[in-house]
Amino acid sequence: MTDHSSAALEGREHLRPDRPDWAASHIPAHRRPLPLVTREAVGRPAAKAAAERLAGRSADWQQGRWPPEFDVLRERASAIRRETLADLDTHLQTLTASVERSGGVVHRAATGEQAADIVRRIAAEHGAGLVVKSKSMVTEEIHLNERLEQAGMSVVETDLGEYLVQLGDERPAHIIAPAVHLSREDVAGRFARLDGRDPDQDGDDDPVTLARFARERMREDFRRADVGVTGVNFAVAETGTLVTVTNEGNADLVTSQPRVHIAVMTIEKVLPRFADLGVLVPLLTYAGMHQDVTVYQTMITGPRRTGERDGPDELHLVILDNGRSGILGTRYEEVLCCIRCGACQTACPVFRTLGGGHAYASVYGGPIGAVLTPLLSDRAEDRDLPYLSSLCGACGDVCPVKIPLPDMLVDLRADAVAAATGPKAATRRLGWRAWATSWRSPRVYRAQVAAARVVNRALPDRLLARLPGMPRAWARGRALPDPGALPDPEAPPDGPPEREAPR
Amino acid sequence: MSRVALFTSCAADLAMPTPAAAARQVLGAAGVTVEVPTTQTCCGQVALNSGHVAAATTLMRHWLDVFAPYDAVVSPSGSCTATVAHHFTRVLDEPLRARAADLASRTYELTQYLVRTGLLDRLDLALDETVTWHDSCHMLRSLGESDTPRTVLSRVRGLRLHEVRDREVCCGFGGTFATKFPDLSCAMADHKLAEVADAGVRTLVAADPGCLLHLGGRARATGVPVRAVHVADLLAQALDGTRPRTVTNDGGTA
């Protein structure tokens, strides 16, 4: 059935993934320790270019801060999101009734596996050969593409960035800029290979040409597709309206051309009132892209009605929990306020220096990923993610719904320490406690300070780099304090202060 | 007479003792005699940020005991000050929380203290130097302070402040982050140092020994001609108008 195959993916066999294993679309059950992965990531030349691209966006942010009109929206949005979480079940019930009233079918899924299975079943029931998707993080979370492909279907990402990432068998490197790790030349290379051309001979990297190439191939798939899958930026409980924002208009085509539209959302995406969109949509686009409004806002209320020309015969809404209700009522509840704008990722200097989110080796990278992933994941090694932060706090500043991400990163580290098992973890805990107790003694403290100063003066960096532990890691790349800059203890005025006992 | 204590910061005690002495000298020049409590150690930040809350609270409690008798606490570390201001009340339970809130309201980073008490007006400062200010993360975001250091620098005759675009971007120190992820941490420092060096500025000033040890150490290891100077040291030098020593490319001092 040739008309069910994908035009966009034609020639995919010519593409050999050139990404590191930790960027792969399939996340393995185990990963190497973060220090090793991040070391590799920082060392890639592509990381520096991506960091520059992201830094440009972030600098934009630093100059502007929150303009007064958005500051007002930020306050209101924060209140709306928290108020929604306080009565989430009721809002989800209202949403379900509203969607059903407008002719849609609502499915609830407790796990990612269940959600992916619901989508697969609906698609299979309609004999789907080709599925087109608009950008969606939740379908990444449930590994939907993999599941549908296993069932023999072709799946095409129609967001340009997602398409590029799909061609390279990668995960999105950023929530709203999935291909931020790629240069124009990388894009030209992927398209040339897809087209059976040699990128070195015939790799036109003119942006207009590249966009046309993608558009022509995708247009064909919009016509051929049987099922369209979208995420949901916001779902309005009172009207049953599903809202998706894009800059490419692909969500309009995904939801209007195929016979079946399946929207996938997680429980916290619900908004009580239609009017709330007036607060949340501009805030989302401003926080994410510094746009007052995105080029397209797609609002879907039910399938095609009698007399309408466009739209699907069937609309299905899959509402997924996947561990989120377990976060409600805990000190991390506010993380569910997240509207997936990606601002914390763009603002995070660690994320930028890593060249994007791949090195976090999880679906969500950056500060939001370092908080959300350990809360949702069963993998023990994901508890390390909160350490992949310098705790600079920029994520908290830029969060449009004021999630205290910096404090959560600190608290999750405490959870990681508490959850760690085995003799090594126990020894470490005891060591910290013993250290703290010893530092209540000024005598011990002063002895250690004196010893450290002697070491700083006496040992050259190359010797320290041979020692185990912290001094070694420090001396690998950084010189110790300049001994000449240390004060001479014989000369009191410039020396360390003589401490006076409190009276 | 009100009693003022200097909270020196353990990172500084261990590896960068000059800012504490310089802070004392500057405050002395403004007519304030500061006491340096011999019993002080660490505010617990390093333990807290490593996930060891029990160890952190032990040290927080000790910190409260040491500084409770004072009318004001002044620190040459924005980050340590921010820990007291932000994390103490967040982590500690009552009745310690109330004590922490009370003491936090009297705890200042050095430039904050100089500006808010008006002591700055009593200082005669002069230095012929072009510097850039590095907003250390905790001072900027947890303590919410970016004005007072600039006010202080603006009072130094002959000093030119050259602001760089990424002045608010983390230098990559991050406490144990620096040793857990050394490559990442150093790459972040390189970004910072390159921006300053490209602007033709040779002196980076900040209020945090941690950032300065990291940036200064990285600059010397890689030969970037930028020296990292604590604001207290800069002010102490500006007191008598002498020019600070300059660091040459080979890492030596001239």
Image (tube, rainbow, N blue to C red):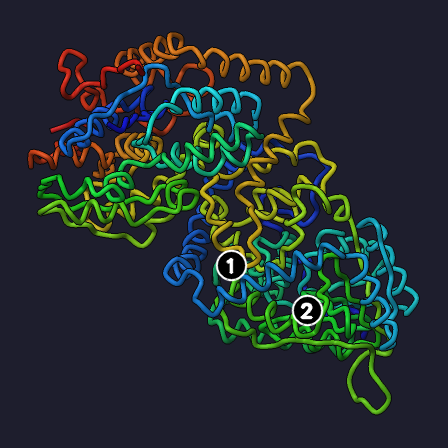
Is residue A9 in view? no
- The percent position of residue B103, horizontal first and vertical second, equals 41, 32
Is residue A176 in view? yes
**Secondary-structure class at tag 1:** helix
- Chain to which mark 1 belongs: A
Q: Residue under label 2, please give it.
A: A8
Total numbered badges shown on the rendered structure: 2
Q: Which is nearer the eye, A30 or A231?
A: A231
Q: Where on the picture, by quarter, is residue A382?
A: top right
- The quadrant of the image that shows the N terminus of chain A is bottom right
Name the disc covering residue A186, or none.
1
**Secondary-structure class at tag 2:** loop
Q: Which is nearer the eye, B7 or A221?
A: B7
Q: Earlier in the sequence, mark 2 or mark 1?
A: 2
Q: Residues within 10 Å of mark 2 (few under 14, many from 20)?
A: many
In the displayed image of the protein, which residue is found farthest to the front? B1
State whether discs 2 and 1 lie on one chain: yes
Vertical comparison of A188 with B212: above or below:
below
- The percent position of residue A324, horizontal first and vertical second, equals 74, 48
- The percent position of residue B188, horizontal first and vertical second, equals 39, 41
Q: What kind of residue is marked 2? A: Ala
Q: Which is nearer the eye, A54 or B150?
A: B150
- Between the C-alphas of marks 2 and 1, the distance is 17 Å
Residue A432 left/right relative to B74: right
